[in-house]
Image (spheres, rainbow, N blue to C red):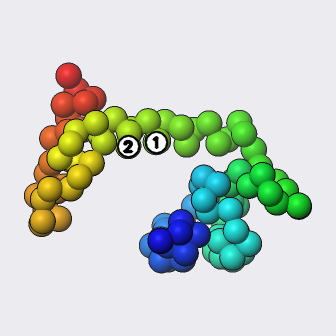
Amino acid sequence: MADCIAADTLLNLLPTTTLLHGDKGYDSEAVRRKVEAMGTAPNIPPKVNRRWKPCFSPFLYRSRNAIERMFNRLKDFRRIATRYDRLAANFLAAVCIAATVSYWL
């Protein structure tokens, strides 16, 4: 499923915030309108093929990189990347153990 299609469901679960960082997969007019309707400013880099490029701050976007690195570090654990666990509680426990090993040791 495309990111901009799944964004509709994800944005409904978003808590109140002032700024939303997203990658180029979420660069669509529908996503931007929905984010702005929620009272949040979207900071999404525009796709290359856009004629009108909306406002984007690369300086603010740098903080998103730390989140990406955290997810990539967790995906180094095969159990997390392939999601072997059937139950959400077991998967969450595996993520917690992987995070502990990655960031504490």
Position of residue 95 relative to residue 50, above or below, is above
The number of numbered badges drawn on the structure is: 2
What's the residue at 64%, 54% (across, down)?
24
In the image: residue 98, left or right of residue 55 = left
Specify few, some or many for label 1: CA neighbours under 10 Å numbering under 14, 14-19, or 20 or more: few
In the image: residue 69, left or right of residue 38 = left
Q: Is residue 39 visible?
A: no
Three-letter amino acid code at disc 1?
Answer: Ile
Secondary structure at numbered mark 1: helix
- Comparing marks 1 and 2, which lies closer to the viewer? 2
Image mark for residue 67: 1
The picture places residue 13, in percent across and down from the top left corner, at 45, 73
Q: In which quarter of the image is residue 71?
A: top left
Secondary structure at numbered mark 2: helix
> Mark 1 touching mark 2, by CB under 8 A?
yes
The residue lying furthest to the top in this view is 105
The picture places residue 96, in percent across and down from the top left corner, at 19, 45
Image mark for residue 71: 2
Image mark for residue 82: none
